[in-house]
Amino acid sequence: MRSVLTLPDDGARTFGAHVAGLLGAMGAAQRGTGPAVEVLEGPAAGEFVQTFPQDAPAGTAAVIRTSGSTGMPKRTALPAASLAASAAATREHLGGDGHWLLALPLHYVAGLAVLSRALLGDTRVAALDLRERFTPEAFTAATRVLADQAALDADLLEEAPRPLYTSLVPTQLTRLLEDDDATEALRSYAAVLVGGGRTPDATRARAREAGIAVVLTYGSAETCGGCVYDGVPLPGVTAEAVNGRLRLGGAMVAGPYLGDPERTAEHFSEEHGTRFYLTDDLGEVTDGVLSVSGRVDDVINTGGVKVSAQAVQRVIEALPGVRGVLVIGVPDPEWGQRVGLVLEEAPGTGIAVPDDATVASAVRAALGAPAVPRLVWRPAALPRLGNGKPDRRASINALEALGREA
């Protein structure tokens, strides 16, 4: 029954055929009847290139490169057994297999994991044409196509329709909730997995009020995608904090980093037959629930005072009129680092985006004067990578330019 659905136009069918080719290659790699697949970002937005790496260890199904937003990208080997374990844990958590809408780039693990889950369940994948800009209208149309085909399959097989699932990043969910038709489309899904970054509290609250079955996920390429859902580790996953740094273990842990034995040794280990991945995230696990407080490189040291970028971001996200926020440390010869802020206003709300004085007052009251952003950039939209995460390097460059002008 497995196939790739596309939007009803020639361009989308071309993209869908490309996805179908990757789905077939991944299926062969996971069964051990074909070589490993490496998915690279294509020359244009939304495009991807499928290659077959010669340096992948035996048993590897796919190779994924990390975003590389702040440094050199890492090539992570995803063993077939780890991908299968990840997909099986998601299936167990969700209560069964379902049909998936692909709305994320395939050269990132979150997009590739959608294909892996559909392969495990032998279910359908509806592919948004990712070469086009993500819009609520396109999401709504693709959801209708997937729902109609799922209903047709159920009629032919004389069974109840299988549930629909999709995986999004927080920015996509925020955009969809601003559109009535897209919000209604979101209600079609038995689960909307949201990961790749922190989901703003306002977005979470709006999704709850709209009756959207949002599941907040945590994971990475090194764990074959999300392995902690709503703070709770999936079946077979171990989550713990080691000196304040989160560590994940289980059959879904991938690795190694190809061509980088030093970083492999730093992040991957094996204890009593269980593979572990030491993340770059700070957090804790209390009564079995994982919470992330920031990243190892997320602490801004300004004039000898350590400031949590995530804590500052939470305060600013709660202000009316704010749509997107990135708080980041900007190198400074005098202070070591300065607190930088990238602020995107929420359009069409009729609520003015807070000015610098309002932002400073809120942050000072909550966290003290050293946490107040000293450099503020207000672009029309936050610069983002293809996977929806903020482009930290581009943001630092822009904030540094502002600092030089000042």
Image: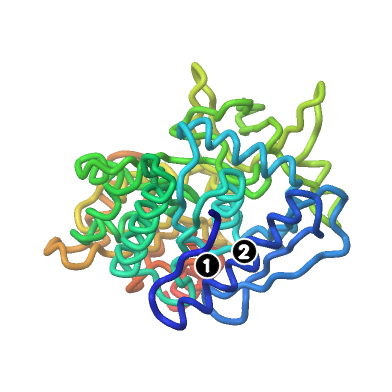
Asked if disc 1 and disc 2 are in contact, CB closer than 8 Å, the reply is yes
Q: Residues within 10 Å of mark 2 (few under 14, many from 20)?
A: many
Determine the residue positioned at 18% across, 59% down. Answer: 180
Q: Is residue 148 above or below residue 14?
A: above
Provide residue 305's location: percent of width, then percent of height. Answer: 51, 43
In this rendering, is residue 67 above or below 203? below
The residue located at (40%, 74%) in the rendering is 133
Left-right relation of 153 to 364: right
Q: Residue at x 75, y 70 (%)?
A: 51
Q: Which residue is denoted by mark 2 in the rendering?
A: 107
Q: Is 41 displayed left or right of 1 in the figure?
A: right
Residue 121 image offset from top left, x and y in percent: 56, 44
Residue count near mark 1 (Cα–Cα under 10 Å), binned few <14, some 14–19, many ≥20: some
- Residue 403 in view of the camera: no
Residue 386: mark in rendering: 1
Amino acid residing under circle 2? His
| Residue 305 horizontal side relative to residue 212, left or right | right
Residue that appears at 52% across and 50% down: 123
Q: Quadrant of the C terminus?
A: bottom left
Q: Is residue 151 above or below residue 162?
A: below
SS class of the residue under badge 1? loop
Residue 183 appears at what percent x and percent y? 24, 54
Q: Is residue 25 above or below residue 80?
A: below
Which callout, 1 or 2, points to the residue nearer the camera?
Answer: 2
Disc assigned to residue 94 = none
Colouring rule applied to residues = rainbow
303 or 222, nearer to the observer: 222
The amino acid marked with disc number 1 is Gly
Q: Secondary structure at mark 2?
A: loop
